[in-house]
Amino acid sequence: MKMKTDELDMTRIPRHIAIIMDGNGRWATERNQPRTYGHQAGVETVRRITSECTRLGVEYLTLYTFSTENWNRPATEIHALMGLVLTSLEDEIFMKNNVRFRVIGDVDRLPKEVQDKLHETEEHTKNNSKMTMVVALSYSSRWEIAEAARKIAREVKEGKLSVDDITEDTVSERLTTSFMPDPELLIRTGGELRISNYLLWQIAYSELYFCDTYWPDFSEEDLRKAIASYQHRQRRFGKTETQVENEGKA
């Protein structure tokens, strides 16, 4: 059964959707192709899903592209992935869809030409306003939280911050994602049921959606199904069902 746009509640589109784009390698292996073939196909899916998100009114789309753990993959695959980053950033999808580009992660570990291209794309698209696409590259949540802890420790040491004044907001404001709201919806493709060190702080109250579809096959309809699932859930943030229902009637 197909999910059409008019079946969605357009007043309840998630403001921020985060995606773990999993299954590229397995998709390629099932077709007797090298894993890099799957990553190339995955770039095409990024283009389609980005366009659909802008059409639906999503404000932030965060894509888990390359984790710090992925540095342990074969050198040939890493090299191919870095090349794909370069070519995909040349795509006019940012300007065509009025999309701003941002990157989060340990960018200093990336090849110099990749760093330069990332910064160039951020600068080129900084005035776009329809949606912000955030690419998590050389990223892991534990790395990010440790970085935030180091920043806080330095500020305490320098007398700029008191230990007693440290709150959850103190941590949030020092994360690489401080410029955007937490995701309302986290999607993982590829059939795995884990978070894989992704936005652990930020998804404390995100709705999670897992599907078996490999990322290269993930379609605009699959995205709409994920959003529809989100819209059929009651977001309670620690409150009871009755409390939430009464708030809705107020």
Image: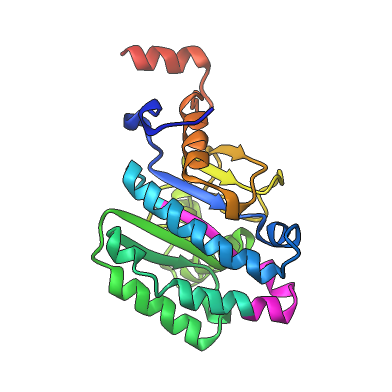
Magenta segment includes 12? no
Residue at position x 45%, y 51% in the image: 49
Q: How many marks?
A: 0
Report the front residue among 171 and 122. 122
Magenta segment includes 70? yes
Specify whether 192 is left or right of 140.
right
Specify whether 89 is left or right of 215.
left
Residue at position x 64%, y 45% in the image: 213
Seen in the picture, residue 208 relative to 39 is either above or below; the reply is above
Residue 107: horizontal and vertical position, in percent? 52, 76
What stretch of residues is rendered in magenta?
61-79
- Quadrant (top left/top right/bottom left/bottom right) for the C terminus: top left
Residue 153: horizontal and vertical position, in percent? 54, 67
Residue 120: horizontal and vertical position, in percent? 36, 79
- Whether residue 177 appears in this view of the structure is no
- Quadrant (top left/top right/bottom left/bottom right) for the N terminus: top right
Specify whether 245 is left or right of 127.
right
- Whether residue 246 appears in this view of the structure is yes
